[in-house]
Image (cartoon, rainbow, N blue to C red):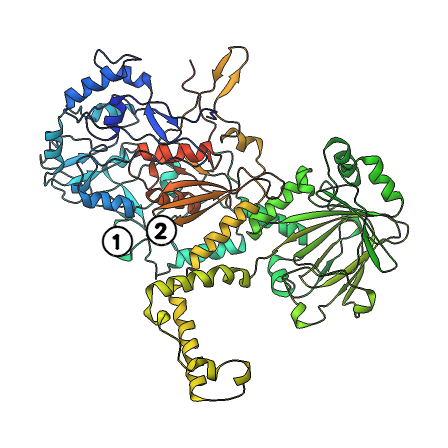
């Protein structure tokens, strides 16, 4: 589905009007959809089965439009909106035929469960109720043959009769086809189950009979196995916390194993109002294991496993409670584990990279030395050629590769996995040091450092921060002299498989010994990821909102504030000074009322999407997303083959747990992602899609459902057309993957 020409194909007038509900044509089969960059049109094959009238021929667009205008008494000046092609995801066509203004407003704010009097005409299928003759049934075309026989044909109606039927006082029953006959009679809804393991009994809904006056919403089950395990979570108001939601968050924090259960999904819409929560939709997510999906892994769980593997035998809980940002940790492996880190990087890998790839001095590689208390850099200009680099090495210089993840796949895999776990950019440097030398002066760094010893031996000395101001510093230090150091708090010799962790601000230096060279990789994280950096973004926005909304922040300063405040008046207590300090404290507390807590976090998340490494996909994942799935060129046939399309029943999920971030922006939202980043830091500009505000709930449902799947038809959106539009757009950008390899049903 990759297309160089991003202009959407034109839709026939029939497809346009039917999608808007302006004509009623009941197809014999569920229509197939073709995704065309934000526009969805029905395939020509289905049009033939619908017995289109004479005159609907290819190339006769104008004549065909006039016929349908005349038949349906439509206005000739109507022109369908076509989204522009470009880097940002185009908004799908939105229309409201024969719907009230209140319904339109509901679509602008949220995607509620539509009531009978606000039902969109393009989704309504009108049938007669033989039992009572008083109910209007809204149904979706049945997928099974048995349901097709039971369904009645709907006669074509003009706009006036459609409006009359829509405005009738009859109750509307919204139902979705069941996969078995037994579920047609009764549908069960599982109670909310708390995560503490308490069993919850299933309650049966009222049976739908001839005299029933209630409106029943039932959800389609994808298979018999999933019927038994599907669960729902009730939507909570913004000021309430459900016990199950709390426990779920704790499980994520602990990195609980993926058991394949159904994820509890609660869709929280942007600009939500607690008073309108009753109208919100509920979304169900299905475990990949229950639908036979091959890709069921959780990137966050894999990141947790990678971190635990790195610090083993220490547990995650012990590490963060005792050592993280507090003190250094030395992990010594047993002799049988000296190959613990084999495969991450080696000296041979460095030589191959120098010979086969374009490595530049200063940008990718540094040549350094440290002798007589002086640290020097010996970088030539241009590309680093192997003979020159090894000549420096033989003369006692250390070699530092600044971004090995750019050139070496195993390092990329490790860093991206840790990035998913820390929710922060993770980088690395590789250091190769000749025997009996030191390449760098003593210094401290502004990152949390994990030194993994890969080859040889190196003796390390670690020193505590000298002052309180040097604890957890924001910036790295200059090169320090030996006289500026105190007594080391930790001293050891690292061998292959060993790990040394030290927090920001801890001074360190290392030197090779005993005639051994040393190769280690330093994994870094949490650079500029502090509360202070968060508040730097948070406070200006909060103050701007307070100035605009609260008159107290716009009142003038006291006339005598210059007389009672300032350095010269610091030690002089006066009523004016006390009143000034009290007012500042009051306004500071009041400022929190306007705190954009979530918006600031979203902005930092968007920055992470620019910093982040792109995900490393497996072959199975590539086949199920736009990377390798979809259309390909066939040399034998000299044409494009493997034409696949997303169907409303197609289960989809995010390609990774932390691959995107939604940022609200006025009447729209920007969806920042890292899929198009390269392995070189900030080589590309920030990548984002611009979505309509009403598309946000569907995106949020996908985020909250991960790692489980959601059928496209179950996304909280207006109709199947809009759902396919959104899912196709996200799929084409590589953000979504399907549960199964798509069947090329459109190949000839």
Is 7 placed above or below 472 here?
above
Is 126 placed above or below 566 here?
above
- Residue identified by numbered label 2: 268
Helix, strand or loop under label 2? loop
Q: Quadrant of residue 59?
A: top left
> In screen coordinates, is 346 left or right of 567?
right
Is 144 placed above or below 134 here?
above
Instruction: Check the picture and name the quadrant holding the C terminus.
Output: top left
Which of the pair 507/586 is nearer the observer? 586
Is 317 placed above or below 627 here?
below
- Residue 718: give x, y in percent of width and height: 29, 38
- Check residue 148 in the rendering and tell me which mark sits there, or answer none: none
Q: Quadrant of residue 196?
A: bottom left
- Check residue 276 in the rendering and tell me which mark sits there, or answer none: 1
One can see residue 124 in this view: yes
- In space, the residues marked 2 and 1 are separated at their CA atoms by 11 Å
Which of the pair 718/243 is nearer the observer? 718
Q: How many numbered discs sit on the rendered protein?
A: 2
| Residue contact between numbered discs 2 and 1, judged by CB atoms under 8 Å | no
> In screen coordinates, is 188 left or right of 737?
left
- Residue 378: give x, y in percent of width and height: 81, 47
- Residue 201: give x, y in percent of width and height: 33, 51
Sequence-first disc among 2 and 1? 2
Which of the pair 497/694 is nearer the observer? 694
- Dot 2, how many residues are within 10 Å of its Cα: few (below 14), some (14-19), or many (20+)? many
């Amino acid at each position: 589905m990759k297309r160089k020409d991003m202009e959407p194909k034109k839709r026939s007038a029939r497809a346009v009007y039917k999608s808007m509900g302006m004509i009623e044509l009941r197809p014999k089969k569920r229509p197939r959809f073709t995704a065309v960059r934000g526009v969805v049109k029905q395939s020509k094959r289905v049009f033939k089965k619908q017995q289109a009238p004479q005159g609907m021929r290819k190339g006769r667009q104008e004549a065909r439009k006039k016929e349908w205008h005349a038949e349906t008494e439509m206005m000739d000046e109507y022109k369908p909106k076509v989204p522009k092609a470009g880097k940002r995801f185009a908004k799908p066509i939105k229309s409201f035929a024969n719907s009230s203004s209140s319904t339109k407003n509901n679509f602008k704010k949220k995607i509620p469960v539509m009531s009978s009097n606000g039902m969109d005409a393009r989704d309504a299928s009108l049938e007669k109720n033989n039992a009572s003759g008083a109910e209007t049934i809204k149904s979706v075309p049945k997928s099974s043959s048995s349901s097709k026989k039971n369904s009645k044909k709907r006669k074509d109606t003009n706009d006036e009769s459609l409006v009359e039927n829509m405005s009738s006082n009859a109750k509307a029953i919204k139902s979705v086809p069941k996969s078995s006959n037994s579920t047609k009679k009764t549908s069960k809804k599982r109670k909310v189950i708390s995560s503490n393991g308490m069993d919850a009994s299933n309650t049966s809904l009222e049976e739908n009979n001839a005299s029933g006056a209630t409106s029943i919403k039932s959800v389609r089950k994808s298979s018999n196995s999933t019927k038994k395990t599907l669960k729902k979570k009730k939507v909570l108001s913004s000021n309430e916390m459900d016990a199950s939601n709390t426990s779920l968050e704790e499980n994520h924090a602990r990195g609980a194993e993926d058991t394949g259960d159904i994820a509890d999904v609660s869709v929280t819409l942007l600009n939500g109002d607690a008073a309108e929560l009753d109208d919100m939709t509920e979304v169900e997510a299905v475990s990949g294991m229950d639908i036979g999906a091959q890709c069921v892994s959780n990137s966050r769980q894999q990141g947790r496993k990678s971190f635990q593997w790195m610090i083993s035998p220490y547990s995650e809980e012990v590490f963060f409670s005792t050592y993280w940002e507090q003190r250094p940790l030395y992990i010594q492996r047993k002799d049988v584990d000296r190959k613990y880190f084999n495969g991450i990087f080696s000296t041979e890998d460095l030589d191959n990279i120098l010979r086969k790839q374009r490595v530049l001095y200063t940008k990718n590689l540094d040549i350094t030395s440290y002798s007589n208390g002086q640290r020097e850099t010996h970088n030539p200009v241009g590309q680093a050629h192997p003979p020159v680099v090894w000549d420096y090495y033989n003369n006692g210089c250390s070699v530092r590769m600044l971004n090995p993840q750019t050139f070496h796949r195993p390092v990329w895999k490790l860093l991206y996995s840790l990035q998913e776990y820390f929710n922060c950019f993770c980088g690395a440097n590789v250091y190769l040091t000749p025997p009996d030398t030191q390449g760098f002066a003593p210094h401290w760094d502004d990152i949390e450092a994990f030194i993994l010893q890969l080859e040889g031996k190196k003796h390390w000395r670690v020193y505590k921060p000298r002052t309180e101001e040097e604890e957890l510093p924001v910036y790295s230090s200059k090169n320090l002299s030996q006289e500026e150091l105190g007594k080391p708090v930790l001293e050891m010799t690292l061998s292959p498989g060993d790990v040394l962790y030290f927090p920001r601000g801890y001074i360190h230096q290392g030197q090779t010994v005993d005639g051994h060279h040393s190769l280690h990789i330093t994994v870094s994280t949490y650079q500029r990821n502090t509360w202070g950096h968060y508040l730097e973004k948070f406070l200006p926005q909060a103050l701007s909102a307070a100035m605009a909304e609260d008159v107290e922040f716009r009142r003038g300063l006291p006339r005598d504030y210059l007389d009672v405040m300032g350095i010269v008046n610091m030690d002089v207590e006066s009523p004016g000074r006390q009143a000034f300090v009290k007012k500042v404290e009051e306004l500071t507390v009041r400022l929190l009322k306007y705190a954009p807590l979530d918006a600031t976090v979203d902005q930092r998340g968007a920055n992470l999407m620019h910093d982040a490494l792109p995900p490393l996909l497996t072959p199975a994942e590539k086949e199920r997303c736009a990377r390798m799935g979809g259309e390909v060129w066939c040399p034998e046939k000299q044409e494009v083959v493997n034409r696949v399309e997303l169907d409303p029943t197609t289960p989809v999920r995010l390609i990774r747990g932390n691959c995107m971030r939604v940022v609200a922006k006025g009447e729209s939202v920007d969806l920042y992602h890292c899929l198009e980043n390269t392995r070189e830091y900030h080589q590309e500009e920030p990548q984002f899609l611009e979505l309509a505000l009403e598309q946000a709930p569907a995106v949020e449902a996908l985020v909250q459902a991960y790692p489980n799947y959601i059928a496209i038809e179950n996304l909280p959106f207006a109709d199947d057309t809009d759902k396919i539009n959104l899912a196709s757009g996200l799929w084409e950008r590589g953000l979504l993957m399907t549960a199964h390899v798509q069947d090329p049903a459109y190949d000839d």
